[in-house]
């Protein structure tokens, strides 16, 4: 070979093999590996024409340039004005004459306000690719989608893509505190460096916005629902404004959590009663102050009268009174109020499962039109596996917003590989039967079932200041999945995993096959070794790290694991049938039917809804006790096998991330054994039955597991 | 040009212009820019022969390979066994026959245990470069030094370098808490992720060790001096062991802070009295437990009986009693105890300036031979400018260790460009006169003045989990300077700035001239706009951010700024002469002489040692009040000019870091004006004299500045 060729190969080598720290997420834009495909891409893409010169169009141009340069390893000319063969033409009908005259009006109509059109067209006799949308925001989404096609090795010869989001508000909720701790955060600390804002704009803020835009996220709540009113003070609003200015060209609106007692804490009022005129006035002034700085401010997210947060019930008012007061203040500016339905109270002796429904269903129809009620996917609290929340379908007059948890509070936190798309899909695909068969949760929250124009899906972010954003390299996939499903909940978990893996690691077929399988079974595995058969909320107190089914000394009954598993000498499980708490009655009859009989109940939810005798015979023919043992041992065994699978993938993964994941899978396997042993030793002490002899006995005692303490576990 | 040439240029372009996030510190190994130099380097360096296969030698080989590949952009063959022209031969005399027979025994002798030899030699008729040391650690330092020669464009044709460190313990002290907050940390949070240790080894740990080794740091205290005993529990010692295993091949020993009351808190004893047998036994057992895990554990750093920390005085014992008890426990393992002299007590009415001296001088000669007393550079607390600590020279029988602060607690924290080498040098070059003229602080702490074999210099680290490690891109220079000066305190600030700039940014001559000047004057500038003329400790309470000379309501007198500036209707300053606190008497007569007469006192320290009337005429001919106004205005003006200088350097700096520094210089200028206005408005309210008309009047009121609050300022 010639010297120069060698040098090129060497330089390419440096570019490709440089250790990857994960900062680039799924936007790595590495050279297309398949030679034939690369050639074909290079033929189809030669130049770029960008219509318009706004901040967003500048981003479109830069992203295309960076993406194509990286993927195709050629220079892409962006300074042409007449289409050539292979020109990418981007623009809205308003900003680009070429787009306006391209005859794609029908497609653009279907794309709606935020959607996009990507289409192959002959323009002036030249084969071009058009990327367009009715708004620059839509066009930006189209740009990222086009790059994704290349990143995932899709054909681009005859493109005809029209895509519009199924859900209007596609949001990330940050539980970030002003001191930069992150509640339930396992990836370091908050990326918002309040101290150096507004003057210092961290590159992170820009790259965060880019990443969100690439998956269609269009709203972010930057503060914790357990809120601090300091965010509403002028000094902090200046900081918020600086972030809003960064996010705006990426199509992202900022929302803040509003501490209900803020008028007292920062406004010197004596009350926060929503029916008090001075309180109403205070919020009106505050909202005006916010919009003066941030004209496109999204609105407020509120956690009220839950887990100690202040709220309207402190003044004998309803959640609707509270939400409507804020809604009235913000309506003139087209802002919205997102009111959380995650409420429970230790003064209420009812099964916690039932309290949100009891509180909110009577309020259906009483909320202003700019109020959404945000409902967690399940009625307890982001459990590893949870039946859908009975509120879905039960408040037809109110637009309900979905709240998923992307951060893995109960799902292995920062040290476990758990792909959450299957969990999200499980809820979305659940049938509420509220308007007959096919009334899925997805249709409730995308607004189609009840014809709501407001619709939303939020995920509690798993983002922190770790270099790779999410701590676990695979946790990035959950951020990605949230965005993709909010855009289109018809996407399958497999499609999402495949896309993400290709962009994040490699599009080698062997790699993809094994890695996709690994991701797709990962959530089942952690359920199996931690909370099998419908067990739930049996984790460590406060930090929620690891197992602690024995805890029974917490102030509120529903903070104790024993409240949830109710293991006794007879059996185990929470009777939520008519003979128990009757939480099942909150579901529509056809939904309820699948769970109400313990002998037919899906065993995934058996102990969620039933208290079952230890010797109850389950479908496998084993007794319940034996089945629990089987599940825990099987789950831990499968966790161990994840390590083997990963080891085989070493040839396809850069050294740094390969080793990161290897070490984390080691931890996960240790944790799986810990869950298995601690839970079975504890339940054995109650069931008085032995762990079957075919299983390796736990090497440590129950007392050992009970005395473990984690005073500095993250995310509290 | 040919297509291939274009492509090479393009790929090089990508490599060079890729945004730099600062993670790589001064170890970027970018291609040598000067063509002629590159050619000459490529001729001189062709291949590598590495003797030995230990973990350290593996690092030597990998570092050389990565460094040379990056710098020279050629493939360096590491698989040869016979020297060629341009072979780099590395090894110790033990591990390499080539080195053993190279005839460099004399040079190796001079290099000592940790030093290195880099020498050009003809071996078997081939022109080679030898890098060697008596230990692999020395050899590793030599490797980094050799790479530094290339990084800083030095000639390498006729190398003959023998270098040995002047100071034995070259340390970084982390004030990192187990919850990952960092006391006085302004670069995010602790890089120690205790939760995922010991199994997960963050790449940061490795790169941290690399960076330290590259500047000769050989010891790190990984926990805060305000200590938490949890670090001494078995679970945490396992985590410490994991870090020690990472650091060992880089020649870095781990030290821990020992909370004096640990036997009570984690050991169930009722006392921590150092003369109690059970306490002594507890520490002996604990030390044994540590060394079982970490055979090369360095020892303990202790802050006792200071600012609320427990200590031997709680039991009416002396600091020597406490230190010796630990020293006896650790002596069998060759560990050492570093006992801090930073003590003051609110029960002691004496000038805080005097208390450490009063406590420690009487103990000179009473410490075990494996105890060092660690003394801050000045007697108050890392002030922007402070006369050297009177303890230096006053404890001839005790090896004194220097404690500098690398983190910029009082020097603009995370938002100011302040190069600290001039501050370090100012102290090191100060003459204590303890054994006559020339008894510099440097000679005290390097052990040469009193022939101590133990010697040490520590810096309180400025490292956090920000991507660029130190927050401010220029703060990296202070980490670098600490290491370089601990190795060789004869290096000038200018040399260090020049080296660091070349490696971190560019070796363009125009850039270097302006950027070096910027760095060298930066510390003078911040002193001028914040604490001119010897003013000190007038910053905000608790977080120490910004000015607050008016504060007078703190519990302890010496926590109040008014205690330090003592401004009254007559004048301003702390009288530390014989008519005042007489702290001056703690200095040797020739040192004292320079400061004791207010009319001859160096004006940098005027208000440090004297209470001076407002109308006192200073050297400029202005009154003291006018001079204060002049200094504050001049300082803020110079802070503004730093922005202009930086703007001119844009062509030489990558976009990301250029903008980072620009934004930070904006903040610094705002802060400079804040310091100027707040201080002058406050002092004006006492002096009752106007700010001279030639200065732009402060745009805000004193009340405005007084009401500013920073509840979430970092580093508390």
Image (cartoon, coloured by chain):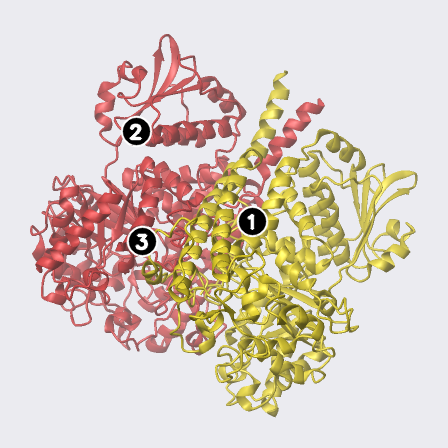
Chain colours: A red, B yellow
Q: Name the residue under label 1.
A: B474
- Same chain letter for marks 1 and 2: no
Relative to A297, A531 lies left or right: right
Looking at the image, residue B314 lies above or below residue A105: below
Measured from the top left, where is residue B687 in percent x and y?
42, 65
Q: Position of residue A76 (x, y in %)?
A: 48, 21
What chain is tagged by disc 2?
Answer: A
Q: Distance between the residues labelled 3 and 2?
A: 32 Å
Q: In this image, B164 relative to A314: left or right?
A: right
Q: Residue A235 carries which label?
A: 3
Question: What chain does mark 1 sit on?
Answer: B
Q: What element carries label 2?
A: helix
Q: Are marks 1 and 2 in contact (CB under 8 Å)?
A: no
Task: Please identify the quadrant where the C terminus of chain B is shown.
Answer: bottom left
Relative to the observer, which residue lies in front, B493 or A688?
B493
Question: Is residue B376 at all visible to an observer of this figure?
Answer: yes
Task: For label 2, count other residues whose C-alpha is less than 10 Å away and answer few (under 14), some (14-19) or many (20+).
Answer: many
| Foreground disc of the pair 3, 2 | 3
Q: Position of residue B546 (x, y in %)?
A: 43, 59
């Amino acid at each position: 070979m010639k010297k120069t060729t060698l040098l090129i190969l060497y330089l390419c080598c440096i570019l490709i093999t440089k250790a990857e720290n994960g900062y680039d997420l799924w936007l790595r834009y590495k050279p297309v590996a398949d030679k034939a495909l690369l050639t074909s891409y290079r033929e189809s893409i030669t130049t770029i024409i960008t219509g318009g010169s706004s901040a967003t169009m500048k981003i479109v141009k830069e992203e295309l340039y960076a993406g194509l340069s990286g993927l195709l390893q050629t220079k892409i000319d962006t300074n042409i004005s007449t289409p050539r063969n292979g020109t990418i033409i981007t623009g809205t009908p308003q900003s680009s004459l070429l787009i306006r005259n391209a005859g794609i009006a029908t497609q653009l109509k279907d794309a709606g306000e935020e959607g996009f059109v990507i289409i192959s067209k002959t323009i002036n006799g030249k084969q071009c690719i058009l990327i367009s949308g009715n708004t620059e925001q839509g066009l930006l989404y189209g740009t990222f989608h086009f790059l994704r096609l290349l990143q995932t090795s899709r054909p681009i010869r005859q493109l005809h893509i029209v895509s519009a989001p199924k859900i209007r508000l596609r949001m990330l909720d940050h539980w970030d505190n002003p001191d930069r701790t992150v509640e339930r955060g396992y990836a370091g600390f908050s990326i918002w460096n309040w101290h150096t804002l507004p003057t210092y704009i961290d590159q992170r803020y820009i790259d965060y916005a880019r990443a969100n835009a690439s998956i269609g996220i269009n709203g972010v709540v930057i503060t914790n629902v357990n809120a601090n009113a300091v965010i509403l003070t002028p000094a902090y609003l200046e900081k918020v404004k600086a972030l809003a200015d960064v996010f705006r060209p990426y199509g992202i609106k900022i929302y803040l959590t509003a501490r209900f007692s803020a008028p007292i804490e920062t406004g010197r009022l004596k009350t926060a009663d929503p029916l008090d005129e001075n309180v109403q006035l205070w919020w009106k002034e505050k909202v005006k102050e916010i919009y003066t700085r941030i004209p496109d401010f999204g609105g407020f997210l509120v956690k009220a009268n839950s887990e100690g947060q202040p709220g309207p019930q402190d003044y004998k008012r309803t959640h609707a009174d509270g939400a409507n007061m804020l809604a009235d203040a913000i309506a003139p500016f087209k802002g919205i109020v997102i009111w959380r339905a995650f409420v429970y109270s230790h003064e209420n002796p009812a099964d916690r499962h039932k309290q949100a429904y009891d509180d909110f269903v009577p309020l259906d129809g009483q909320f202003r039109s700019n109020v959404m009620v945000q409902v967690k996917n399940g009625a307890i609290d982001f459990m590893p596996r949870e039946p859908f929340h009975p509120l879905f379908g039960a408040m037809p007059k109110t637009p309900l917003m979905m709240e998923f948890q992307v951060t893995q509070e109960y799902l292995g936190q920062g040290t476990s590989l758990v792909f959450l798309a299957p969990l999200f899909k499980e809820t979305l695909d659940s049938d509420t039967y509220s308007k007959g068969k096919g009334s899925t949760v997805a249709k409730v929250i995308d607004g189609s079932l009840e014809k709501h124009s407001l619709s939303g899906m939020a995920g509690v972010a798993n983002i922190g200041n770790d270099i790779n954003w999410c701590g676990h390299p695979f946790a990035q996939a959950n951020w990605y999945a949230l965005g993709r499903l909010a855009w289109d909940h018809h996407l399958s978990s497999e499609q999402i995993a495949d896309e993400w893996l290709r962009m994040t690691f490699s599009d080698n077929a062997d790699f993809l096959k094994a890695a996709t399988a690994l991701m797709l079974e990962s959530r089942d595995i952690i359920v199996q070794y931690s909370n099998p058969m419908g067990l739930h909320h049996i984790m460590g107190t406060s930090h929620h790290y690891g197992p602690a089914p024995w805890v029974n000394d917490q102030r509120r009954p529903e903070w104790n694991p024993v409240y949830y598993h109710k293991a006794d000498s007879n059996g185990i499980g929470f009777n939520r049938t008519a003979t128990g708490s009757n939480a099942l009655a909150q579901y529509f009859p056809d939904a309820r039917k699948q769970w109400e009989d313990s002998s037919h109940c899906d065993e995934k939810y058996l102990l969620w809804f039933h208290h079952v005798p230890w010797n109850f015979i389950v479908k496998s023919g084993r007794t319940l006790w034996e089945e629990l043992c089987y599940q825990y041992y099987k789950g831990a065994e499968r966790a161990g096998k994840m390590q083997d699978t990963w080891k085989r993938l070493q040839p396809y993964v850069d050294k740094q991330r390969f080793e990161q994941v290897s070490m984390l899978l080691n931890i996960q396997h240790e944790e799986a054994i810990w869950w298995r042993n601690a839970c079975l030793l504890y339940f054995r002490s109650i069931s008085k039955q032995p762990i079957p002899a075919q299983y390796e006995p736990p090497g440590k005692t129950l007392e050992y597991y009970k005395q473990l303490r984690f005073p500095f576990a993250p995310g509290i």
